[in-house]
Image (tube, helix red, strand yellow):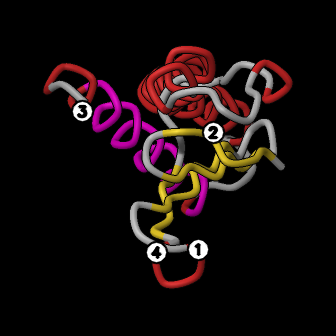
């Protein structure tokens, strides 16, 4: 918030405090000026704090939309067949979300490429597709 807006809100609060104190001293005469003063304070408060809140909300929405656009989407696993090369899989589906080392289960040079958005796992041995699930 800039210094001008702080000054405006401070002035609105000061005039409201003056009329509120005056209403305490002479409650019969000061009702209308206090209501008007409260309206001025409310307007200054809204003018000072609402635009930054709206800008923050707009920036948050823009960030969410940008992340949705930049999120990776992969091709379909139906395009991949046993015997395809790992380079061919990367070209058809793009880079995997995760690569799991399966050497302890399926032997040397065995990996599983996980594609979360398509719920697909491509099992690769020696840079060649073994099977797709």
Which of the marked residues, 3 or 4, is nearer the chain's N terminus? 3
Q: Which residue is mark 3?
A: 6
**Crowd rating for badge 2 (residues with CA inside 10 Å; few <14, some 14–19, many 20+):** many
Q: Which residue is mark 2?
A: 34
Which of the marked residues, 1 or 2, is nearer the chain's N terminus? 2
Secondary element at image label 1: helix
Residue in the foreground of this view, choosing between 69 and 107: 107
Q: Residue at x 48, y 55 (%)?
A: 99
**Residue 13 x, y percent position in the rendering:** 39, 42
Alpha-carbon span between mark 1 and mark 3: 68 Å
Q: Which residue is mark 4?
A: 103
Callouts 3 and 4 close, C-beta under 8 Å? no
Q: Main secondary structure of the magenta part?
A: helix
Residue numbers of the magenta segment: 8-24
Q: Residue at x 49, y 84 (%)?
A: 104
Examine the structure image and report whether residue 14 is included in the region drawn in magenta.
Answer: yes
Secondary element at image label 4: helix
Alpha-carbon span between mark 3 and mark 4: 65 Å
In the rendered view, tell whether residue 30 sits above or below residue 91.
Answer: below
Residue in the foreground of this view, choosing between 100 and 36: 100
Q: Which residue is mark 1?
A: 106
Callouts 4 and 1 close, C-beta under 8 Å? yes
**Crowd rating for badge 1 (residues with CA inside 10 Å; few <14, some 14–19, many 20+):** few
């Amino acid at each position: 918030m800039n210094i001008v807006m702080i000054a405006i809100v401070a002035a609105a609060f000061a005039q409201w405090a003056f009329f509120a104190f005056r209403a305490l001293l002479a409650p019969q005469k000061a009702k209308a000026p206090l209501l008007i003063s409260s309206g001025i304070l409310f307007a200054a408060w809204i003018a000072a704090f609402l635009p930054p809140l709206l800008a923050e909300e707009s920036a948050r929405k823009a960030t969410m939309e940008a992340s949705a656009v930049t999120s990776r989407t992969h091709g379909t696993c139906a395009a991949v067949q046993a015997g395809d090369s790992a380079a061919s899989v990367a070209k058809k589906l793009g880079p995997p979300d995760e690569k799991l080392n399966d050497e302890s289960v399926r032997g040397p040079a065995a990996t599983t490429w996980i594609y979360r958005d398509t719920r697909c796992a491509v099992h690769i041995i020696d840079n060649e597709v073994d099977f797709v699930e």
